[in-house]
Image: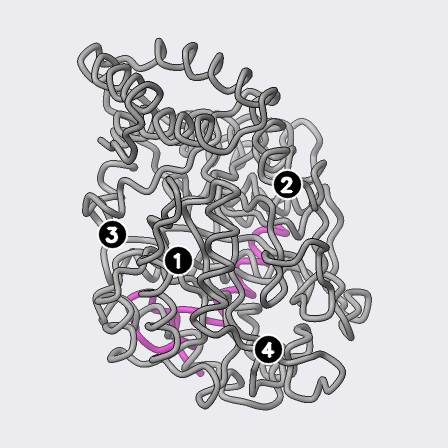
Amino acid sequence: MSTYDPKSLHADDFINHEEIMDTLEYAKKNKNNFALIDEILSKAKPVRNGGVLTCKGLTHREAAVLLECDDPKKVSQMIELAEEIKQEFYGNRIVLFAPLYLSNYCVNGCLYCPYHLKNKAIPRKKLTQEEIRAEVIALQDMGHKRLAIEAGEDPINNPIEYILDSIKTIYDIKHKNGAIRRINVNIAATSVEEYRMLRDAEIGTYILFQETYDRKGYEELHPTGPKSNYEYHTEAMDRAMQGGIDDVGLGVLFGLEKYKYEFVGLLMHAEHLEAVHGVGPHTISVPRVKKADDIDPSEFEGGIDDDIFTKIIACIRIAVPYTGMIISTRESEEVRKKALAMGISQISGGSRTSVGGYTEDERPHDTEQFDVSDQRSLDEVIDWLIDLGYIPSFCTACYREGRTGDRFMSLCKTGQISNCCHPNALMTLTEYMMDYASPSVKEKGMALIRKELENIPNVQVRGVAKLHIEEIMKAGKRDFRF
């Protein structure tokens, strides 16, 4: 039997089953210990001292107590605290991105994904570099600046060389005023050497979902293929960081296994990265299993309703206040609206989860990885965000200015990152308004930009931002950043 050790590089030590079970039992015993819950909430509250923001976050055990508590008054306090933390660290900015599916060839047997090897009904497709170019131009014509590329695991059809060639193709495309400025990568666990290749290709964040942290459940859900190796998959983020990738993104697929177990495992993984590498996850994603082709979510026992799902998001935000949180178009407009207030800082918009889907007039369904619940266009999503009081942001400045890893976290943990993010969000939103927005959205957006410029506290930064926005609007210049 292994011993819990967050500094260990062995999966069974830093995601320790006995520690998770002890934590869940502790949480159950203290779910109505309101004195303890008040103490935990007080600890997590953000504090400003001399203009510097500090927020301690929570341990996995403390956060588990909050998740277990179902007292309406305390749950309301948790949600209020999550909203306060979200506002302190991320303000009203929401970063937008889109997934780009390169290939659905896959050799794994994952029971929750229609790309699994035994699915003979789904058409298999792999984009050529010319097809990737067409997809990227379609995404640029929407206004996207940030992509997350996706591909199944297949060493013959999707080798690392194919991924690297695709990244180069995407970065090289300059169409009208469009350009993809950041490529995040969501591909299978690989070696330190190949992570080093991805770093040299100048990727943004390396994202890998654990799906489930329960070893037994993991092995049942992944019966065949290289992904069936629990240790290799769970230890992937350490290899990525050893390969020089500063920013990594965690996530579990909620709905497969018991959500409280997954919640604790996810936070333990974040604590492990902090303990070993000095920096936690750059992002945490919260996907839920959805219907797709031959996949029926009701076949899994871990399904959760919307209220539990949004409570999970709030508790993650309280526990890891500095980490970006991502929600995709798997979720409906209504769920995404709730999640935005509670902690989400990045959303996808205008997404298509099929291989080659962006160049099609009608949304194709035959190669989708999952059903898209929010099928609005990017312009409609931006219109919605503005109406909700958010600033849609296409900013990629931190990655391109070298503010990654511990450098990003040191700024974020003290709240100083907002000195860059707010003006960058407004400048990139101005680009969108000038180049891509519909007339009604442009009118709303420019009014929002004028208003939010006055909310930049630093007078010098505000002046420079106003000058750059004037140059974007009248001189046709692009890509300013702080």
The mark nearer the N terminus, 3 or 1, is: 1
In the image, the segment drawn in magenta is: 1-30
| Distance from Cα at disc 2 to Cα at disc 1 | 21 Å
Classed neighbour count for the residue bearing mark 3: other residues with Cα under 10 Å, few (<14), some (14–19), many (≥20): many
Residue for badge 4: 125
State which tag comes first along the sequence, 3 or 2: 2
Quarter occupied by residue 117: bottom right
Query: CA separation, marks 3 and 4?
Result: 35 Å
Residue for badge 1: 184
Q: Earlier in the sequence, mark 3 or mark 4?
A: 4
Q: Is residue 404 above or below residue 159?
A: above
Residue at 68%, 73% (x, y): give it: 112
**Residue identifier under label 2:** 377
Between 381 and 82, the one nearer to me in the picture: 381
Q: Secondary structure beneath disc 1?
A: strand
Residue 433 locus on image (x, y percent): 47, 26
**Badge 3 amino acid:** Gly
